[in-house]
Image: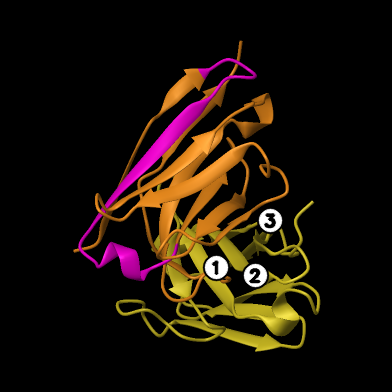
Chain colours: A yellow, B orange
Protein backbone atom coordinates (compact mmCIF):
# COMPACT_ATOMS: atom_id res chain seq x y z
CA UNK A 1 0.00 0.00 0.00
CA UNK A 2 1.70 3.17 -1.23
CA UNK A 3 1.47 6.46 0.65
CA UNK A 4 0.73 8.22 -2.63
CA UNK A 5 -2.15 6.95 -4.76
CA UNK A 6 -1.92 6.66 -8.53
CA UNK A 7 -4.24 4.91 -11.00
CA UNK A 8 -2.74 1.54 -11.99
CA UNK A 9 -3.13 2.23 -15.69
CA UNK A 10 -4.15 4.83 -18.25
CA UNK A 11 -4.38 4.65 -22.00
CA UNK A 12 -4.88 6.94 -24.96
CA UNK A 13 -4.33 7.03 -28.69
CA UNK A 14 -1.22 8.43 -30.39
CA UNK A 15 -1.34 12.20 -30.62
CA UNK A 16 -3.83 12.51 -27.80
CA UNK A 17 -3.36 13.86 -24.28
CA UNK A 18 -3.36 11.93 -21.02
CA UNK A 19 -3.20 12.91 -17.38
CA UNK A 20 -1.96 10.86 -14.44
CA UNK A 21 -3.06 11.77 -10.94
CA UNK A 22 -1.18 11.41 -7.68
CA UNK A 23 -3.07 11.81 -4.42
CA UNK A 24 -1.53 12.25 -0.99
CA UNK A 25 -1.99 14.18 2.21
CA UNK A 26 -0.94 17.39 3.91
CA UNK A 27 2.10 15.56 5.27
CA UNK A 28 3.53 14.84 1.83
CA UNK A 29 2.17 16.47 -1.32
CA UNK A 30 0.41 19.19 0.65
CA UNK A 31 3.66 20.61 1.98
CA UNK A 32 6.45 19.36 -0.23
CA UNK A 33 7.55 19.46 -3.85
CA UNK A 34 6.44 16.67 -6.16
CA UNK A 35 8.57 14.93 -8.78
CA UNK A 36 7.56 12.64 -11.62
CA UNK A 37 9.60 9.83 -13.13
CA UNK A 38 9.32 7.76 -16.28
CA UNK A 39 10.56 4.17 -16.29
CA UNK A 40 10.84 2.42 -19.62
CA UNK A 41 10.91 -1.39 -19.47
CA UNK A 42 14.19 -2.72 -18.15
CA UNK A 43 15.71 0.69 -17.48
CA UNK A 44 16.34 2.99 -14.54
CA UNK A 45 13.79 5.71 -13.77
CA UNK A 46 14.21 9.09 -15.44
CA UNK A 47 13.29 12.44 -13.91
CA UNK A 48 10.55 14.17 -15.93
CA UNK A 49 9.28 16.85 -13.55
CA UNK A 50 10.67 18.29 -10.31
CA UNK A 51 9.49 21.01 -7.94
CA UNK A 52 5.88 20.31 -9.04
CA UNK A 53 6.16 21.75 -12.54
CA UNK A 54 9.78 22.18 -13.66
CA UNK A 55 11.33 20.18 -16.47
CA UNK A 56 15.01 19.17 -16.46
CA UNK A 57 17.01 20.04 -19.51
CA UNK A 58 16.17 17.73 -22.39
CA UNK A 59 12.64 16.88 -21.30
CA UNK A 60 10.20 18.03 -24.00
CA UNK A 61 7.42 20.44 -23.14
CA UNK A 62 4.91 17.73 -23.99
CA UNK A 63 5.38 16.76 -20.36
CA UNK A 64 3.94 19.05 -17.68
CA UNK A 65 3.27 18.92 -13.97
CA UNK A 66 0.90 20.67 -11.62
CA UNK A 67 -0.08 20.54 -7.98
CA UNK A 68 -3.17 21.59 -6.10
CA UNK A 69 -3.59 20.99 -2.40
CA UNK A 70 -2.79 17.37 -1.67
CA UNK A 71 -2.87 16.16 -5.29
CA UNK A 72 -0.53 16.40 -8.23
CA UNK A 73 -0.98 15.71 -11.92
CA UNK A 74 1.32 14.75 -14.76
CA UNK A 75 0.16 15.71 -18.24
CA UNK A 76 1.49 14.31 -21.48
CA UNK A 77 0.38 15.75 -24.81
CA UNK A 78 1.04 14.54 -28.33
CA UNK A 79 1.36 10.94 -27.16
CA UNK A 80 3.90 8.76 -28.92
CA UNK A 81 4.36 5.01 -28.80
CA UNK A 82 7.72 5.67 -27.17
CA UNK A 83 5.89 7.17 -24.19
CA UNK A 84 4.65 3.71 -23.17
CA UNK A 85 6.20 3.28 -19.74
CA UNK A 86 5.52 3.25 -16.02
CA UNK A 87 5.17 6.66 -14.41
CA UNK A 88 5.78 7.39 -10.74
CA UNK A 89 5.15 10.41 -8.57
CA UNK A 90 7.31 11.04 -5.54
CA UNK A 91 7.70 13.50 -2.71
CA UNK A 92 8.94 13.85 0.86
CA UNK A 93 6.68 12.88 3.73
CA UNK A 94 7.21 15.12 6.71
CA UNK A 95 5.50 12.82 9.21
CA UNK A 96 7.50 9.78 8.11
CA UNK A 97 10.74 11.75 7.62
CA UNK A 98 11.17 9.71 4.48
CA UNK A 99 10.70 9.85 0.75
CA UNK A 100 7.58 8.27 -0.70
CA UNK A 101 6.51 7.15 -4.17
CA UNK A 102 3.18 6.38 -5.72
CA UNK A 103 2.47 2.83 -6.79
CA UNK A 104 3.09 3.68 -10.42
CA UNK A 105 0.87 4.08 -13.47
CA UNK A 106 1.32 2.05 -16.63
CA UNK A 107 0.70 4.15 -19.74
CA UNK A 108 -0.46 2.36 -22.85
CA UNK A 109 -0.51 4.23 -26.15
CA UNK A 110 -3.14 2.39 -28.16
CA UNK B 1 28.77 13.63 -17.98
CA UNK B 2 27.26 12.44 -14.71
CA UNK B 3 27.72 8.73 -14.12
CA UNK B 4 26.68 6.52 -11.22
CA UNK B 5 28.06 3.00 -11.25
CA UNK B 6 26.71 0.57 -8.67
CA UNK B 7 28.37 -2.65 -7.59
CA UNK B 8 27.88 -5.29 -4.93
CA UNK B 9 25.23 -7.40 -6.62
CA UNK B 10 24.73 -10.77 -5.05
CA UNK B 11 22.79 -13.66 -3.62
CA UNK B 12 22.73 -13.76 0.17
CA UNK B 13 21.00 -15.99 2.70
CA UNK B 14 18.31 -14.61 5.02
CA UNK B 15 19.96 -12.97 7.99
CA UNK B 16 23.10 -12.23 5.99
CA UNK B 17 24.81 -8.99 5.07
CA UNK B 18 25.83 -7.22 1.89
CA UNK B 19 27.41 -3.89 1.02
CA UNK B 20 26.47 -1.97 -2.10
CA UNK B 21 28.71 0.70 -3.60
CA UNK B 22 27.98 3.51 -6.03
CA UNK B 23 30.92 5.28 -7.67
CA UNK B 24 30.04 8.77 -8.90
CA UNK B 25 31.70 10.92 -11.53
CA UNK B 26 30.98 14.01 -13.58
CA UNK B 27 29.87 16.28 -10.72
CA UNK B 28 31.14 17.62 -7.40
CA UNK B 29 30.09 14.61 -5.34
CA UNK B 30 30.40 16.22 -1.90
CA UNK B 31 28.02 19.03 -2.87
CA UNK B 32 24.99 16.81 -3.34
CA UNK B 33 22.82 14.59 -1.23
CA UNK B 34 22.47 11.04 -2.47
CA UNK B 35 19.77 8.43 -2.13
CA UNK B 36 19.08 4.72 -2.53
CA UNK B 37 15.83 3.54 -4.12
CA UNK B 38 14.86 -0.09 -4.64
CA UNK B 39 12.43 -1.97 -6.82
CA UNK B 40 11.29 -5.50 -6.03
CA UNK B 41 10.69 -7.75 -9.04
CA UNK B 42 7.56 -6.61 -10.86
CA UNK B 43 6.83 -3.96 -8.24
CA UNK B 44 7.05 -0.18 -7.94
CA UNK B 45 9.74 2.11 -6.63
CA UNK B 46 10.49 2.20 -2.91
CA UNK B 47 12.57 4.98 -1.35
CA UNK B 48 15.18 3.45 0.97
CA UNK B 49 17.55 6.06 2.35
CA UNK B 50 19.24 9.41 1.84
CA UNK B 51 22.43 11.09 3.05
CA UNK B 52 23.49 14.72 2.83
CA UNK B 53 26.61 16.00 1.16
CA UNK B 54 29.01 15.70 4.09
CA UNK B 55 27.52 12.43 5.33
CA UNK B 56 26.48 13.88 8.66
CA UNK B 57 22.73 13.53 8.19
CA UNK B 58 20.80 10.44 7.14
CA UNK B 59 17.22 9.27 6.73
CA UNK B 60 15.79 5.76 6.35
CA UNK B 61 12.55 4.09 5.39
CA UNK B 62 10.90 2.34 8.33
CA UNK B 63 11.27 -0.97 6.47
CA UNK B 64 15.08 -0.80 6.67
CA UNK B 65 15.70 1.32 9.76
CA UNK B 66 18.09 -0.34 12.15
CA UNK B 67 19.25 -2.85 9.50
CA UNK B 68 20.67 -0.67 6.71
CA UNK B 69 23.28 2.07 6.96
CA UNK B 70 23.93 4.66 4.27
CA UNK B 71 27.30 6.39 4.24
CA UNK B 72 29.68 8.01 1.82
CA UNK B 73 33.39 8.51 1.21
CA UNK B 74 33.73 11.89 -0.47
CA UNK B 75 37.46 11.37 -0.99
CA UNK B 76 36.58 8.46 -3.27
CA UNK B 77 33.31 9.86 -4.69
CA UNK B 78 31.55 6.75 -3.50
CA UNK B 79 28.21 6.10 -1.83
CA UNK B 80 27.55 2.94 0.16
CA UNK B 81 24.63 0.99 1.54
CA UNK B 82 25.52 -1.53 4.23
CA UNK B 83 22.71 -4.04 4.56
CA UNK B 84 22.41 -6.45 7.49
CA UNK B 85 19.78 -8.87 8.79
CA UNK B 86 18.58 -9.25 5.23
CA UNK B 87 15.13 -10.67 4.61
CA UNK B 88 13.45 -12.17 1.56
CA UNK B 89 11.45 -8.99 1.08
CA UNK B 90 14.68 -7.02 0.65
CA UNK B 91 15.10 -8.77 -2.71
CA UNK B 92 15.14 -5.99 -5.29
CA UNK B 93 17.11 -3.98 -7.78
CA UNK B 94 18.82 -1.22 -5.81
CA UNK B 95 19.44 2.13 -7.51
CA UNK B 96 21.67 4.88 -6.27
CA UNK B 97 20.57 8.34 -7.29
CA UNK B 98 21.81 11.90 -7.06
CA UNK B 99 19.43 14.48 -5.67
CA UNK B 100 19.04 17.64 -7.74
CA UNK B 101 18.96 19.84 -4.65
CA UNK B 102 18.34 19.46 -0.95
CA UNK B 103 18.03 16.23 0.95
CA UNK B 104 14.45 16.00 2.22
CA UNK B 105 13.17 15.69 -1.30
CA UNK B 106 12.63 13.11 -4.03
CA UNK B 107 14.09 14.94 -7.03
CA UNK B 108 16.60 12.36 -8.24
CA UNK B 109 18.03 13.74 -11.47
CA UNK B 110 20.57 11.00 -12.16
CA UNK B 111 20.26 7.28 -11.49
CA UNK B 112 22.64 4.36 -11.63
CA UNK B 113 21.93 1.29 -13.71
CA UNK B 114 20.80 -0.68 -10.67
CA UNK B 115 22.24 -3.70 -8.92
CA UNK B 116 20.29 -6.83 -8.02
CA UNK B 117 20.18 -8.11 -4.47
CA UNK B 118 18.60 -11.53 -3.97
CA UNK B 119 17.90 -12.82 -0.48
CA UNK B 120 17.18 -16.52 -0.54
CA UNK B 121 18.24 -19.76 1.09
As measured in the structure, the alpha-carbon distance from the residue carrying label 2 to the one carrying label 3 is: 15 Å
Q: Is residue B32 left or right of residue A98?
A: left
- The question of residue B65 being in magenta is answered with no
**Which mark sits nearer the N-terminus, 2 or 3?**
2
Horizontal and vertical percent position of residue B114:
40, 42
Q: Residues within 10 Å of mark 2 (few under 14, many from 20)?
A: many
Question: Which of the 4 quarters of the picture holds residue A4?
Answer: bottom right
Which residue has dot 2 on it? A92
Q: Secondary structure at mark 1?
A: loop
> Is the residue A32 above or below the residue B8 in the image?
below
Circle 2/circle 3 CB separation < 8 Å? no
Pick the residue in front: B54 or A3: B54
Q: Is residue A74 left or right of residue A27?
A: left
Which residue has dot 3 on it? A103
Q: Which residues are magenta?
A: B12-33
* Residue drawn at point x = 58 percent, y = 15 percent: B13
Amino acid sequence: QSVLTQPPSVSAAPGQKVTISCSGSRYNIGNNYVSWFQQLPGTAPKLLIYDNNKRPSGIPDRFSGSKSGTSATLGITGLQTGDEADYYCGTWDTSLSAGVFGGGTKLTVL
Amino acid sequence: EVQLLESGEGLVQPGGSLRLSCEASGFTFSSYAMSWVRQAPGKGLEWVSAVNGDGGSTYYADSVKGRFTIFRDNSKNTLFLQMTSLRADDTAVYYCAKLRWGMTTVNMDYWGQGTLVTVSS
